[in-house]
Structures are given as structure tokens and as C-alpha cells.
Image: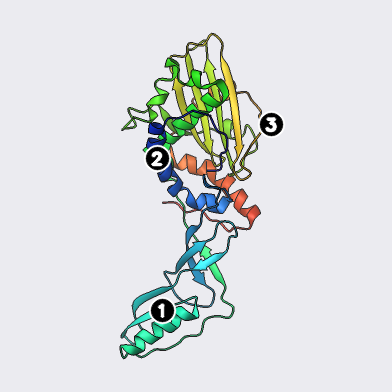
Amino acid sequence: MGGKLKVPDGSCKQCNGAFAKFEAKLEANTTLLLNMFGIRNRDGVIPNARVAIGICGFDEEGLSGLRIGDSGEIKLSERVVNVVDTDGKPRRRGIFTKNASAEKFIAKSKARGEQVTELPAPEPPTLEASFKFSLPFCLGFETRKVVAKIALAAIAYELGISVALSPDFDRLRTARTASTVRELCPVGFFCNEDFIGSYARTVQQHSVMCYLSAGRKEGWALVTLFGALTYLVEATDSYTGRESKSFSIFCDAAKQERFYPVVLADEQSLVAKVLSKATKFEDRAAIDAQWYPIMAAYCAQAGIPVSRSQA
């Protein structure tokens, strides 16, 4: 999803194989976002996205095609469907983008003794692409496992692999083997105004903010995806470090590089705010309300019309 930081020797083949399945599902659920926000995947490619397509001046429903990742070009998929015309007679209707495809369809139809009527297309055709996106993937078990892995990888990157492999983080490492949410270390999505307002956000940002408390013997990571899809990871309940530790990692997913924003509070303070009663946990409507303004601001700047619907 645009991240480039690496932890050398940070994962074995077994873990890589297990998490590849979870990450593949998350990638499939976020393809539209990567396409719309211009974020390259792990292969360095902005993925194409399947979209619904309308042709201005042409009344035809059910058309679809691709929004090409790098260029944003809309490519209409050719289509042949069975329809019942206004005269009540069944017909086959074909929509083609290439003359060769249309001529092949006409030739086969005539060979079957069918009457063929060629309808002119708008010159030049204006295509309008649209797609719908919902946030159920935020709640998914696979997403929570990947978020737990992100937190652990961040700890390994900032504090060292030996720290991440210590008994302090045994529970966090169960992310690979957990088969249910109950077995997984606590990972929940949340909404908190103070946290969201702590620095300037865009949908092209991911981040991890971590605080390990020597006094409370506990540790937490605040993981943010796409600017405002926020998760609290209870990284450890048995922290043995003599000193409290904290760190933050901010990633510009579009540029695939780390950046350093001005943050209005430190990690300890922000974790405390998230753990307060002001936070809403596992609230679908709240996470939508938190993320939508940031997403809409990006779309407005990019010239992408966007609207919000309630399920």
C-alpha cells in the first residue's frame, strides 16, 4: 500500500507465506483506493480498478471497464447481452470499442440468419466512470492481523529485531497463528478527534505511533491507514523495559518515502487520549465520519466528484 521501509531478516518464510494470504485480501479490498489515490502496490504499480461506465448521450446500463492506474484513462469493456426491445422481441445487443470485434459479431449474426442493425456511437464518445467503495474491510479479521503485523514490524524497525522477538511481545506475535479475533492480540479500530487533529492528514499517508510504558508495564501502537482509518493495537501487557520508549513512523504512500510532520502532542499523550472515554471503538458510523472528510478533500483537489451514501 505504498510502504517502502524494510526490516532485514525480519520475517521467516513461514510467516511470509501466512501473511501473504491476509495481505492479498487486504490488497484486493483496497484496489479502488490505491487506484484513486495514486498509490503503488508492492510491485511498484498503481493497480487498475474495475469501474461502472456510462457513455454521454447513449442510454445503456450495466457497462463497465477499467480505470488505468498510471494514466487514469478509462477503457470500456466490450459487451454482448440479450435484451428485450420496446417491440417485445428478444435481441442481442453488442457494444464494441474495436471495429474488428464489431465486424466479427456482425458476421456471425448474419451467418445465423439474424437481422443486424448498426447503431452509431457518439463521436467522440465521452465516458464517465464511477465506483462505490465501502469500509467493511476495516472490521475484517485479516485486516486486524495485518495491522498487528504492521505494529510488530514497526517495533522491529525502530527498536531492533531482538526487542520484537523478546517475550514482551509474545502476544503480538500470535497474529500469524491466531484463527479467531479472540486469539489475536487486541486490535480495534477507533475514532478520536484529538488524535485525528494532532497533525495534517491526507489519504496518501500511513503511520505508526508507539508508546511502551515502563511504569504500567504495557505498550500500545496507534496504526493509521489512508490518513484516518485508525487502529489501537495493545502491543504488550508485560513490558519489562527499564525505561519507557516511544517512536513514530509516518509514510507518504504516494511518494513511497518517510516524512516528518509537525505533531501537536507526543506518543504518550496521544495514546492516553485514545485510551480515554472520548474515544469511540468499533463504531462503523464514526469511522466513516472520521475518514470521509479527509477522503473528500483529496478528491476535491484531484477533481474527482464524490458523494456519500448511508447503507
Residue at mark 3 to residue at mark 2: CA–CA distance = 33 Å
Establish if 51 lies above or below 43: below
Q: Amino acid at mark 2?
A: Phe
- Mark 3 Cα within 10 Å, few/some/many (few <14, many 20+)? few
Among the 4 quarters of the image, the one containing residue 186: top left
Q: Amino acid at mark 3?
A: Val
| Residue beneath the point at 57% across and 40% down | 227
Is 135 situated left or right of 56 in this image? left
| Residue beneath the point at 38% across and 41% down | 21
| Residue picked out by circle 2 | 22
Q: Secondary structure at mark 1?
A: strand
Establish if 124 lies above or below 149: below
| Residue picked out by circle 1 | 94
| In front of the other: 132 or 279 | 132
* Mark carried by residue 184: none
- Mark 1 Cα within 10 Å, few/some/many (few <14, many 20+)? some
Residue 275 in view: no
How many numbered circles does the render carry?
3
| In front of the other: 105 or 31 | 105
| Residue beneath the point at 66% across and 28% down | 264
Q: Amino acid at mark 1?
A: Gly
* Mark carried by residue 262: 3
Tag 3 near tag 2, CB within 8 Å: no
Residue at mark 1 to residue at mark 2: CA–CA distance = 39 Å
Task: Give the image location of residue 307, x and y in percent.
Answer: 53, 56
